[in-house]
Amino acid sequence: MEEKIPLPFLLTPHEPQKPARKNFLGIGHWNKYTRGDEYLSLTPESHSISEDELMKHCSPEDMWMALSQNGKLRVYDVTKFAEYHPGGFDLIATNAGTDASEEFRRAHAYVSVDMISRLQKGYLVRSSRRRPMPNFLSPRLPVSRPISKEERIKGRTKPTWDWKTISSSTVTVEIVLGVRELYSPLPATHCLAVCSRTDGTSVLTLRVLRNQDYYLLKLRLLPIFQPDLTSLALNFSSDRRSTSRTVDDPVYASPLTVLSGGSRLLNPRLAIDLRLTSNTDEHSRLQQFSALGATLEDRLIDTPEVSSGKVEDFFSCRVVISRRLGNSIYRYLRLLYHPDEVRVCVPLLHHVFVRVFDASGEPHIRPYTPCCIEFESADRQKSEATVNSLDLLVKVYELGCVSTILDKLRPGDNLQVSLPVGNMFPSVLLGCPGGFDEDSLRPWRYIYMLAGGSGITPFLRVLLLNSHFSSIDEKKTATAPKLRLLWFNRTLDDIVLEDELSQYASRLHPRLIVQHILSENDSADSLKRPKILNGCLTEDLVRSFISPEQSSPQPDANLWMICGPRGFNTAAVGILETLKEYSRNVHVLQA
């Protein structure tokens, strides 16, 4: 196979800080102003203006921008005009110091630049090594300058991105993630893509989960481009060659996948292809594209926010399986989403929100953690697509608003689901935090999981991952962390996954111990089972499951993960504080 050469490290300029909003007067007032003596006394200038000079004029008191007019890039001082701009002062200020030709063309296809002709300062002279301009998707060339302070957020390097023409019908967008190594047991689940169409154009949203934050890039593409979401791939370099894994790769997308050689990707990059639409003329197909569209968002975020009032936060899924699990109060749902609109795999320890509407039309949202497809029979797994699916385990409460609506869903119904979010990063599973380098990342000795009711779902994939890892790399099993799962339920019927958990315990023996705790003793036979206790969450119970070999807590000894109702989570955190477990090693999951 031909060796792939990694692309050079590319830098994206810092986006200008958005100034405070100012009141604007409107275009009618501008037309009146252009007939006054002040405007008529101005004389258009014809100086040669470099890109560096243009970029200096980006403050609210001094705003220049370049606009294409009759085949030339004319530079205008739009400081005065911003007060009259119908779209508001902020939009002008955001594009100040840039070549805003594409933004102007898309927003004002039938508006002449002549209305500000007397504000002309000169003509933009492009350098032989064209630089990227903020807020405009122009071609970028490799840059070797050091990273500026503005390109770091809280000490973290912001990713950079670029594109290249692959063929007459394909352009590839690539994001250099800005981390030397990406730590994750399931790296392919770290990237997602969403494509929405408005007024004939596509808005492409790309989001990448890094070691300790997220990167969001949102592009409004020219009408000639259509994203190919099936091409979404996480590329990385090894010692000898560049490697690529797509989200659709059946091995990589599966929750069973781990890196047999470890959990670190060197120099990770995200790539996705843009295809030319079928109605693109031949001239457009043969050109080297100078623009893709416009940048809507390009930033680092700590935790993605989901708001019930924003429709774009959710995508539509179709229910293909809906059934109660035995005599329990749990309903199992399998959801399929459209592969041309969404490409998403939920990262470990992350969840989604579902949104439903009550009889009066009011929206309600609730978090759920997608679980594993292993809980369906083999025949069902083979008959249903799984690459673009989500599986939910819903605990139905008699008076629960969301769960009772979900309980009524049947195959063919639609359900709105959010993009995955989470307050715990998968890299935590790999070792004690405190730095992400080989010397400071130490594997946990014990991983404790405290689950209350449906709070079991985040831990199912953790167990599945460890189970598969043990089967493909037996040499590392001896040094792998020991696993302890305590699952609290009310009755025996609530333990809907007893057989599956027993299988995990068998595969991971002696690393994994599963203990069921029931708060109600509804069966005399239940207490005869060695893995079922009667009781509730107490300090003595938790203490009894801490390994006796640990005479005192150590910083890198125990990872504690808690998931359940709010009262359960609060009580568990309080108990661990009493037991003097390190607070930075205690994590509460939301769903």
Image (tube, rainbow, N blue to C red):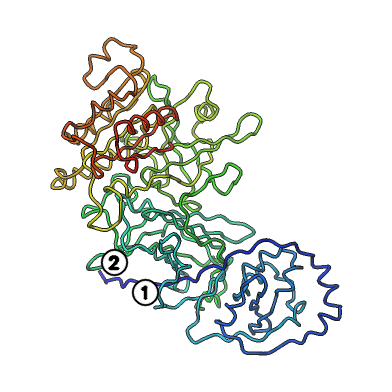
Which quadrant holds the N terminus? bottom left
- For label 2, count other residues whose C-alpha is less than 10 Å away and answer few (under 14), some (14-19) or many (20+): some
Name the residue type under label 2. Ser
Could you tell me which residue is drawn at 52 percent across and 47 percent down? 305
- Callout 1: helix, strand or loop? loop
**Circle 2 or circle 1, nearest the eye:** 1
- State which tag comes first along the sequence, 2 or 1: 1
**Residue 33: which quarter of the image?**
bottom right
Vertical side of 171 occupied by 20: above or below: above
Residue most toward the bottom? 47
- Residue 580, position as x, y percentages in the image: 29, 35
Which quadrant holds the C terminus? top left
**Residue 356: which quarter of the image?**
top right
Q: How many marks?
A: 2
- Residue 116, position as x, y percentages in the image: 75, 78
Q: Which residue was labeled with disc 1?
A: 8
- Residue 255, position as x, y percentages in the image: 32, 44
- Residue 470, position as x, y percentages in the image: 19, 43
Alpha-carbon distance for marks 2 and 1? 13 Å
Q: Which mark is residue 277?
A: none
Q: Which residue was labeled with disc 2?
A: 242
Name the residue type under label 1. Pro
Could you tell me which residue is drawn at 76 percent across and 79 percent down? 114
Q: Nearer the viewer, residue 76 or 345?
A: 76
